[in-house]
Image: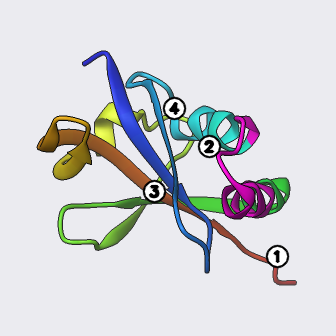
Amino acid sequence: MGTILVRVKPPCREAVSRRMPSDLPLELAARHVAKSSPRNDVERQTQLQMLREMDGPHDYLAIKDRGESRWVDGGTTRLRDIAVMRETQTSRGVQRTAVAAFELQAYADVG
């Protein structure tokens, strides 16, 4: 599949998008997105939130066609496994593109 558009979203923030190889596991893709050069201050703040989410126990929630989310294993699930075709705005107008979108969800241990 080559490269794929990746959208990673921590809670209460906008997603950060980057183009990445489709065979990357979600865990590695999230780290790459979080450590990439921010395009603006809002994106920098979102990336800092992503790093905080990944610092402790956390889950990966794949966002499917209609916006519903489901738990996936971030270490074994690859970007291509969760990709869906979406209409995106490009320099050539609106096009259908494969997008791998997922959320990071940190949680506190109970007990």
> In the figure, residue 60 lies in which quadrant?
bottom right
Disc 4 or 2, which lies upstream in sequence? 4
Q: Which residue is mark 3?
A: 102
Q: Which residue is mark 2?
A: 30
Q: Is residue 71 above or below residue 35?
A: below
Q: Is residue 21 above or below residue 12?
A: above
Q: Which residue is mark 4?
A: 25
In three-dimensional space, the C-alpha distance between marks 3 and 4, rounded to whole angstroms, equals 12 Å
In three-dimensional space, the C-alpha distance between marks 4 and 1, rounded to whole angstroms, equals 24 Å
Q: Nearer the viewer, mark 3 or mark 4?
A: 3
Q: Nearer the viewer, mark 2 or mark 1?
A: 2
In three-dimensional space, the C-alpha distance between marks 2 and 1, rounded to whole angstroms, equals 22 Å
What's under tag 4, amino acid-wise?
Pro
What's under tag 3, amino acid-wise?
Phe
- Secondary structure beneath disc 1? loop
Residue 45 lies within the magenta run: yes
